Image (cartoon, coloured by chain):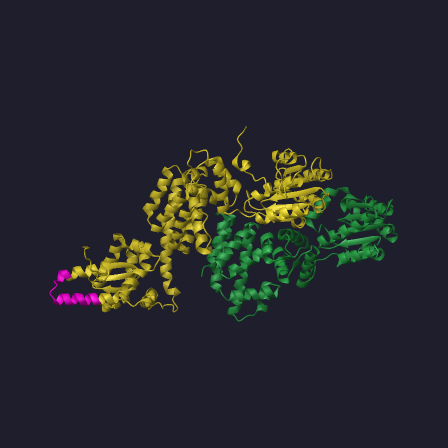
Chain colours: A yellow, B green
Amino acid sequence: MAYLALYREWRPKNFRDIVGQEHVRVTLTNALLRGKVAHAYLFSGPRGTGKTTAAKILAKALNCNSRDGAEPCNECSSCRDIDQGLALDVLEIDAASNRGIDEIRDLREKVKLAASSGKYKVYIIDEVHMLTTEAFNALLKTLEEPPASVVFVLATTEVHKVPLTILSRVQRFEFHRISSAGITNRLQEVCAALGRQVEEKALQIISVKAEGGLRDALSILDQCLLQDDPIRVEHVYQAIGMVGETFSADLTEALLEGDYGLVLSKLEEGVALGRDPRQIVRELLDYLRQALLFLAGGQEPLLSPDVAERLNHQSKRAGLSKILTWINVLLKGEGELRYTSNGRLAAEMIFVQTLYEQDKVVCDEDQKIPAISKKPPKSSESKKETAEESQPANSAHLKKAEPIEVGQADFSVLLAKWPEVLEEVKRKKKSTHAFLLEGRPAGVIGETLYLVFKDGYSFHRDKFNQPENRTVVESVLEDLFGRRININNLTEKEYMDLHQAKNDTQVAIKGLTDQETRGITESEEDCIQKAVEFFGAELVHISKDR
Amino acid sequence: MSLEIVNQDIQNKQIPSIYLWYGEDRFSLTEALKILKQEFLREDPSGSGIEVYLGKDILPEEVAALANTSAFFSRRLVIVDDIPYFNQGKGNPNQAGEEDVKEEAGLHAESEGSNADCLISYCQNPNPASCLVLVSEKVNRGRKLYKEIVRAGKVLEFSFPKGQSAWLNWVQKETKRRGKIINPAAASFLLESSGHQTGILSQDLDKLCLFIGDKQEINREAISAVCIPIIETTIFAMLDAIAAGNPHDAIQRLTEVLSQEYYLKVHTMIVRQIRLLLAGSILRKRGGSVEQLMEVTGIRSSFEGNKIFRQASGFTPEKLCRALEDCLQTEIALKSSGGNPQLLLEMVVIRFCQK
């Protein structure tokens, strides 16, 4: 016997097997049990959600010789005939290919004839939105008052194309997208019955990629099952012809780094694996759209759980404006990609431009700072006022904890000159400036400046710790203050911990001072100071177990 | 109301020889036809005295001839649906339906106007053993045929209930007819969700009664589960969410709207909303009033005017101008294959909702 596709083999045969459409199941079964079946139904909803299946089950239930409650027996000749498409009283019409008035006139004539063997004649008109206006009008009167033993079931994915006159004459049911969990459960059921081993993660990806359509999910699974067990995530990506969300996530990571080289090498990696640059851009756009919807609308991303987690993290790091900028550039680029002969070069250009635009946005935002403040700076005093106004903005979080008092005089000078530092850093290296914008000077201890980054900005902190960024700022500080100032970067939480330990610090320093009076050398003091900076000022006594 | 008149006519055994039924409420009209047919079927269960035709399929003289012929076992009921006698000289008022009439009827449709005289003559001397029911969507009260029917028979208009309380009564009455109950709040929610269309509401009530099974009362949860919100409800909710700067709701509604409506139309609605907000914002700045806003923008409903005026307080004209510019760029992108339409519209909404 010829192979039967999974979605056909596993098509529900009873109302109870329909997944995720409780409202339809309950209403139709109650209608059957109470003998209140309407003369015309309209099943609408996304593809693969069970519209035609429900219509066929209804047709079977109406004509079944030994119905079990509302469920068809699936054993009698009528049920079998309907399942095999042989029933004379159940007519499945594809409105996409029978869309004219002549076909509907023909139908109208035949409707009057009684059912040949069953109790009801059921007309299932699939893709009904494809009918012409004239055909719809011709169908109106029949739908309004069909003969007693005729039931019409219209099915469509595009209900907005069905005229209101039809809608008011039918009982309409909206089939919802099936939840990922619902699809995964069904797929697990199928795999268990087939005795195949499929990773749960692979099934989750299939259910997410099916976008609520069980038929699509089963089709993907069908393709995946051509591989040997166990079926893994890679097989799924292979089957659906996608570069993979992980690749898009990696690419986004590279974009977040702001590193041109890294982005291009990532693209090269993808191309070297035989992936189409256009597809890479399209998938990245899709990935960024999910990030956008997550960030702005709080919508859970339709991705496998681990990639979804990465996306959540990345979207928070990037922020809304950056994602919007990226999408804008990529959308324009995607349009151009369609007409280019050298897809790879075009994709490279698009990614470079994406990063370039991102840098530009950072610059623009920086220029907007004076405008955001309440008092717009006057041109002659702009520099001075900008410095004064950006100071409270930068120090806004300082109110949570006082600056460390050590080196207070130096710190005030540094704060006053901080805008100049920012300006100079921006002139030297824009990307460093972008990271520095997220930090604020919190205090000075000795020759060390403490920069505090907001919680959740650990990425910026880490990036800032890299020598190529750190040295830029340190050299600027050296130029402005005439001496070398080291930088210690902390997140707010780390800083708060440090602040809470302030008293301990003082105690420790006091202890150190006592020790100094007891004869500690200058080099030893430096060592201790370093230890305090690195490990905090808490004195811990370590003793060996005996 | 007209449905009740038909019921009374039947009960009082005063069914006129000629009925002219018209109006937008097709559902009530169809119900009335069913009741009338049942009455004739009661007299003659074989149904041999009932004739149903479409106006485009039968000539007026044939209608007159049928009405003049007596049935064997009972009175004769001749129903002529969608009569075209009042459409003449109007230049195709009802687009698709009328096109279909012409297309399907051919010769009949062209000749019916001149021969309506046969029906006028029939009205002057109708057969008392027949009931001729002429059904039309619209009528022309100036026509001689209309005046003759008024004189010799009964003209009934089937119109939708007027006003919210009439609608609520209608819903409650229909629910009661089905052996269930619905409280005013739930009835109001149903109207909001399913719209003010008796046909659709009736279908929804049927569904709801089946869905709740043995329970007696139709509640809000059942309505949410079974009924499909009309596009207008979703669009208003989306525009309100946009105006309130709530991206979460706005995006959710946008997805729903886009599943039912063409993206350019949705874009146009967003532009309109921003334009109204801009007018509201500028007027507020100038110390204007809601009335002025309504006059300037052409808003007719004071509810909408008040809402826009209130919502406009949350925006500066500069922001709204920027949003309009953004809409322009999006429209260009939409019309020049500049990307996935849904994504483009989502971006407009998100940018607008950004504080």
In the displayed structure, would residue B266 be above or below residue A152? below
Q: Nearer the viewer, residue A499 or A287?
A: A499
Q: Which residues are magenta?
A: A507-524
Q: Quadrant of residue A509?
A: bottom left
Q: Residue at x 64, y 38 (%)?
A: A93
In the displayed structure, would residue B110 be above or below residue B32? above
Q: Nearer the viewer, residue A323 or A216?
A: A216
Taking the image as shown, residue A544 lies to the left or right of residue A171, namely left
The single residue placed furthest to the left in the displayed view is: A519
Spot occupied by residue B310 in the image (x, y as percentages of width and height) = 54, 66
Q: Where is the N terminus of chain A found, in terms of image quarters?
A: top right
The single residue placed furthest to the top in the displayed view is: A1
**Can the viewer see residue B193 in this picture?**
yes
Spot occupied by residue B137 in the image (x, y as percentages of width and height) = 73, 52
Taking the image as shown, residue B121 lies to the left or right of residue A196, namely right
Taking the image as shown, residue B146 lies to the left or right of residue A400, namely right
Q: Nearer the viewer, residue B353 or A341?
A: B353
Q: Residue at x 47, y 63 (%)?
A: B318
Q: Residue at x 46, y 48 (%)?
A: A302
